[in-house]
């Protein structure tokens, strides 16, 4: 008696899996064949590395030592590169609304949450790849350039190395940071649809916390703002020195950003599921 | 046989003047609810962040000292913190020096020879002693001052630690005399003469050949003034960014100078010299480090402090809240305005309206001009409302809470508010031009954010090396944020003149010119592409 039922559910499962694979393939084809995706990924790498190199070039550590965090310094570009990552994610969904493509997409693949999940997975993988290149290139630039600016072993700064635990955490964490920024942006863009508005909202949300924190004299407010800001808290993952003075541990900070991304995705998914396209 | 008369519209022929075009574009703008809402959001966000800053920036009385910062702890006056002295012109000043003085009744003069100026090595830089070399703007010389009340008018001739002989007056005035350091082998002779309200300074290397350095008028100088020898030595300021947080090290220093050949003309009613620290409550070194002794016409005077304008900013010694802080929401308002400006053009392409627009008005350059004027004006009004609202409301909040806000003369405040509106307006036109070129709102917003918002945002927290933000704020359109600089930079006062403290690498209107140049180039390129490309 139970045998046919189990068979049925296996068949349904297989059907679902195939449906998922095909949705993934369809989304991948769309993403891959839009010219802007490649350019934006390239732009992410270029801007991240350029700003990091500029920060390396401007930093100095006089003989006798200085208080600095070379890993964080060499990853400065992430703060600029995230803007392009946000745009990649926003365009993945709101680009379809601009062109009316979304109606075809949803006719062919009516399971909306599967579509959104496929988009999220693909954007995450693309940003993971580009982010890894950008972050590794930035750290390499830091390793090559910083010793020329006084960050030498004599001052307490051995060359940056991935074999060093905190540096490895900063590097992998920075890549994950970019992925989470992409997911946050995808969630916001799914909810608001209009690409320009989505980009404005995401970048406003990211940058408002560090800017406000910089002038708030009240330390109590300052710590709270830094803890809840997706960018300020998320970037704790880049810290390799002075961890005691941070309001959260690096991984907790990245967790705050993950909560923001999850919240945005849930809202986006709900709106996407229940609203007319 | 019926003749068919071709249809002729009975409507009046419409004129296609620029006025009509402007009216058409304005109608497009005001009838899209989302765009008007976007402008209102821009103004509210900017003003709202200003109000938030005014509330949150007021320090609580207990938790203040930021890591690594030595020197005076800044509280609001309400917390029993420093009451800042004001100089003649209303500028906040530091008026702290060791003064060996006598009253001078009526006109007269004083002449001295300075043979040495050395530091006492009490200051530290990142924990290391600064050494016995006098800091560059340590000062020793003669001064004529309107009494000893803080902030009173003065004129002084002095030797400095690294900037030769100077004549300075009323805290902000400065002119140079002989160059080179003072020593027993090459002493400096200084002279001040008073004639009514007019003080004239001279210097000399040998006491016989005198050079006129400067003449200044001190309005309202009383008949009897205080005159004599003085020494002071400003804080040694260094800046470093560490752990993503900027630290300003302001360590106090003290200097000692040796004077002889003191001679005077005129009426000096007191028989003896009086030595005192002008503002003992503000003295940053041990009271025993300052003072004077006199041995047979030879005076050794030690002092600490500065006679100079206070510099704004969290890493400096002035009040750390400025009007610029109330406008830090500008970047958010700018994003919202840019979103509207980009869509003002890209929506035409997305909806196909551009074909109607260009059919009705075939001169494409004029269409772009009309759009630029409409969006620029709307953005200016939005920016003006946002900036004026932010500054007025936030200032009121801070004032009623007793927080010290760096005071602005009204022309500066007007420049900051109108400048912010102009910055938002021109940035909106720049975004419109970019959107015309790339036709996609997402790309236009991205470009705009990368070239204007990110340079501004990176310069706000003092974590990025100042060299990077300095460069970005010179060449990118974000240079226009210099319009928000709240206080002038004084070369004769060393301080942390960095963007995060409100000091920009370019002068306010020069920075604005950079934005205008970008916009002009972008508009020209947009007009060219609009004309040459199919719509």
Image (tube, grey):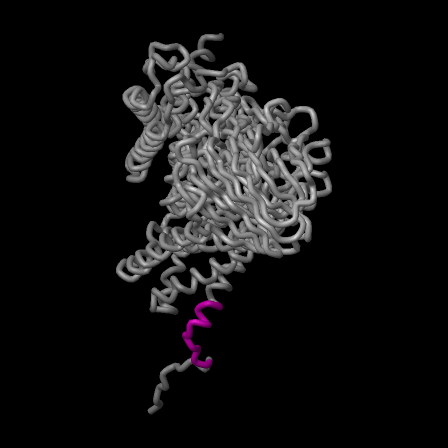
Q: In the picture, which quadrant includes the N terminus of chain B?
A: bottom left
Q: Is residue A88 magenta?
A: no
The C terminus of chain B is located in which quarter?
bottom left
In this rendering, would B395 be left or right of A134?
Answer: right
Q: Residue at x 46, y 72 (%)?
A: B19
Q: Picture coordinates of residue A160 (x, y %)? A: 33, 16
Q: Nearer the viewer, residue A69 or B61?
A: B61
Vertical arrangement, residue A6 with respect to residue B378, above or below: above
Tell me residue B349's x, y (percent): 38, 54
Residue B524 can be seen in this image: yes
Comparing B142 with B155, the one in front is B142
Residue at (53% x, 59% y) in the render = B31
Image location of residue A201, percent across then percent down: 50, 39
- Please tell me whether residue B15 belongs to the stretch shown in magenta: yes
- What is the number of callouts on the image? 0
Q: Tell whether B480 sits left or right of B328.
A: left
- Residue at figure coordinates x 55%, y 22% from the top left: B67
Which of the pair A214/B366 is nearer the observer? Answer: A214
Query: In the rendered structure, which segment of residues is drawn in magenta?
Result: B12-23
Residue A83 seen anywhere in this rendered image of the structure: no
């Amino acid at each position: 008696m139970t045998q046919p039922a189990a068979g049925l559910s296996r068949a349904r499962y297989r059907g679902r899996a195939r449906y998922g694979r095909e949705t993934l393939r369809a989304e991948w084809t769309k993403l891959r064949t839009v010219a802007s995706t490649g350019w934006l990924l390239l732009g992410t790498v270029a801007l991240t590395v350029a700003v990091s190199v500029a920060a390396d070039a401007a930093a100095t550590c006089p003989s006798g030592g200085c208080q600095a965090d070379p890993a964080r310094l060499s990853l400065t570009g992430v703060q600029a590169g995230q803007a392009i990552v946000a745009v990649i994610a926003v365009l993945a969904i709101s680009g379809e609304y601009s062109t009316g493509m979304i109606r075809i997409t949803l006719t062919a693949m009516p399971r909306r949450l599967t579509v959104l999940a496929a988009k999220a997975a693909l954007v995450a993988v693309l940003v993971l790849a580009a982010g890894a290149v950008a972050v590794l290139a930035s750290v390499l630039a830091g390793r090559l350039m910083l010793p020329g600016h006084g960050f030498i072993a004599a001052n307490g700064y051995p060359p940056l190395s991935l074999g060093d635990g905190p540096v490895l955490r900063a590097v992998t964490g920075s890549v994950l940071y970019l992925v989470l920024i992409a997911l946050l942006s995808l969630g916001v863009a799914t909810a608001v649809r209009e690409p320009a508005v989505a980009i404005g909202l995401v970048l406003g949300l990211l940058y408002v916390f560090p800017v406000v924190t910089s002038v708030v004299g009240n330390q109590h407010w300052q710590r709270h703002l830094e803890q809840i800001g997706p960018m300020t808290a998320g970037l704790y993952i880049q810290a390799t020195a002075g961890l005691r003075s941070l309001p959260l541990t690096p991984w907790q900070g990245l967790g705050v950003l993950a909560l923001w991304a999850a919240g945005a995705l849930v809202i986006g998914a709900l709106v996407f599921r229940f609203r007319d396209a | 046989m019926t003749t068919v008369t071709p249809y002729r519209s009975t409507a009046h022929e419409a004129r296609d003047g620029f006025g009509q075009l402007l009216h058409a574009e304005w109608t497009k703008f005001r009838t899209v609810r989302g765009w008007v809402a976007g402008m209102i959001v821009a103004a509210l966000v900017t003003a709202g962040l200003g109000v938030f800053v005014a509330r949150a920036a007021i320090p609580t009385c207990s938790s203040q000292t930021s890591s690594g910062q030595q020197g005076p702890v800044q509280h609001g006056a309400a917390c029993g913190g420093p009451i800042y002295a004001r100089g003649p012109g209303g500028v906040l000043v530091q008026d702290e020096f060791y003064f060996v003085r006598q009253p001078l009744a009526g006109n007269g003069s004083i002449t001295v020879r300075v043979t040495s100026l050395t530091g006492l090595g009490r200051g530290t830089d990142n924990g290391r002693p600064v050494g016995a070399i006098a800091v560059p703007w340590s000062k020793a010389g003669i001064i004529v001052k309107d009494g000893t009340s803080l902030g009173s008018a003065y004129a002084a001739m002095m030797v400095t630690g690294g900037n030769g002989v100077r004549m300075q007056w009323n805290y902000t005035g400065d002119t140079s005399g002989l160059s080179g350091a003072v020593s027993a082998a090459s002493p400096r002779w200084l002279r001040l003469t008073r004639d009514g309200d007019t003080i004239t300074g001279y210097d000399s290397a040998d006491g016989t050949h005198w050079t006129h350095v400067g003449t200044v008028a001190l309005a309202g100088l009383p008949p009897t003034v205080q005159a004599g020898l003085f020494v002071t030595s400003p804080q040694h300021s260094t800046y470093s960014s560490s752990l993503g947080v900027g630290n300003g090290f302001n360590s106090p220093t003290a200097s000692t100078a040796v004077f002889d050949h003191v001679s005077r003309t005129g009426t000096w009613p007191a028989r003896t010299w009086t030595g005192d620290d002008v503002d003992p409550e503000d003295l940053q070194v041990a009271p025993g480090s300052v003072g004077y002794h006199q041995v047979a016409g030879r005076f050794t005077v030690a002092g600490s402090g500065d006679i100079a304008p206070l510099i704004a900013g969290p890493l400096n010694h002035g009040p750390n809240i400025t009007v610029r802080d109330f406008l830090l929401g500008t970047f958010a308002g700018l994003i919202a305005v840019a979103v509207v400006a980009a869509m003002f053009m890209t929506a035409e392409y997305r909806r196909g309206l551009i074909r109607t627009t260009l059919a009705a008005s075939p001169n494409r350059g004029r269409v772009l001009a009309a759009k630029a004027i409409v969006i620029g004006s709307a953005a200016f009004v939005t920016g003006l409302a946002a900036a004026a609202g932010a500054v007025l409301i936030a200032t009121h909040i801070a004032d009623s809470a007793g927080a010290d806000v760096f005071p602005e003369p009204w022309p500066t405040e007007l420049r900051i508010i109108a400048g912010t509106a102009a910055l938002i307006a021109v940035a909106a036109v720049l975004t419109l031009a970019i959107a015309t070129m790339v036709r996609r709102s997402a790309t236009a917003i991205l470009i705009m954010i990368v070239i204007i918002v990110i340079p501004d945002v990176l310069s706000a927290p003092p974590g990025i090396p100042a060299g990077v933000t300095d460069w970005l704020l010179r060449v990118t359109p974000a240079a226009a944020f210099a319009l928000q600089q709240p206080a002038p930079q004084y070369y004769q006062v060393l301080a942390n003149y960095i963007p995060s403290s409100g000091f920009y690498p370019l002068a306010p209107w020069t920075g604005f010119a950079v934005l205008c140049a970008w916009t002009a180039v972008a508009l020209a390129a947009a007009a060219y592409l609009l004309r040459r490309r199919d719509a």
